[in-house]
Image: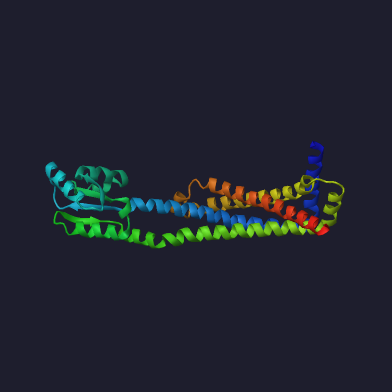
Amino acid sequence: MFSQIGYLISETFRSLKQHQTVILPSLVTIFLCSLLLSASFVTFLGVFRVISVEKSLYKVEAFLKESVSEKSVSSIKLDLYKIKWVDSVEYISATAALEDFKKHFSGEMLSLVSDNPLPASFRLTLQDRYKTPFYLNSLSNELSSNPLFDAVQAPVAWVERLSSWKFSLLFWPFAISFLLLMTLSLIIGNSVRLSLFSRKILVENMKYAGGSSFFIVFPFVLEGLIQGLVGSLLSVFFFIFVFNSLQDLLPVAAIYLSGYGWMLFLVVLLVTFLSVYFSWRSVSRFLLSDRAGST
């Protein structure tokens, strides 16, 4: 058994060398499609993370005109909770706002100011079912009309932009990935068929000599595995090289695309699986059709 497998493996590599005019174009195409597939998968990961961040943007910051007592804070909170879109209300004192400012910005920016210039505020978040640009804008307008507040901030423009782009951002990476997988399936299948036709007499002789289906199919499946694995790995290494080269130029994109390695692993797994499956399928169909023709 092991001697047969050793022979089949050596036969596979001999066949790869002998039919390199068929194998090399297929390998190059698999490399290019896998490269595009890697870019599409990683883009899909980034888009998914951006959309998940969108939910955290549904917040409104309402700044008080003047400081209020703790009792008034509780009363204002109760009034704000009466707005049906509101999920949570958080009071941020002027002292807490100053501490938060110092964490994100240099303290030198406030060196010319003796007192705390930052006002107290209320931070409101929307309920999940109301997290749409319409309700965010409605809440912002309602708070702006409240005489207690001096200013109201809400990322309405960003939310509207992300909401309008959401379908396109999800649809196109998915559609491109699907088309690339279909293209890979056709390429691998055609490559195996060409290899089969060039060795049709050899396959028929092996079958008439009593060779089992495993004995005939194994070299072709191994060829498909090698093509898929080599082509996808080369594309993944090239993608990593290009991404690392451009990472300094696109620091924001690098943040959303961090940890993309498992997506590249999925590309290698998918391409290799497709190569093995369609190699097996093409040879099996060839044997079945040949058997049906001989009967």
Quadrant in which the C terminus appears: bottom right
Say whether residue 181 is visible.
Answer: yes
State left or right for residue 16 relative to residue 278: right
**Residue depicted at 44% across the width and 49% down the height:** 255
Q: Residue at x 81, y 49 (%)?
A: 14
Report x, y in % for residue 266.
57, 48
The residue nearer to you, when weighing 61 against 165, is: 165
State whether residue 112 appears in this view.
Answer: no
In the picture, measured across the screen, residue 180 lies left or right of residue 279, that is: left
Tell me the quarter of the picture where residue 177 sits: bottom right
**Total count of labels:** 0
Q: Is residue 68 above or below residue 158?
A: above
- The image shows residue 41 at horizontal and vertical percentages of 53, 53
Measured along the vertical axis of the image, is residue 73 above or below residue 192? above
How did the renderer colour the structure?
A: rainbow
**Apparent side of residue 292 relative to residue 247 in the rendered image (left or right):** right
- Residue 200 placed where, x, y %? 82, 57
Q: Residue at x 78, y 40 (%)?
A: 5
Coordinates of residue 73 in the picture (x, y in percent): 15, 45
Question: Residue at the location (74% across, 53% down)?
Answer: 283
Could you tell me which quadrant the N terminus lies in? top right
Outermost residue, front side: 295
Q: Is residue 233 above or below residue 165?
A: above
- Residue in the foreground of this view, choosing between 14 and 249: 14
Q: Residue furthest top?
A: 2
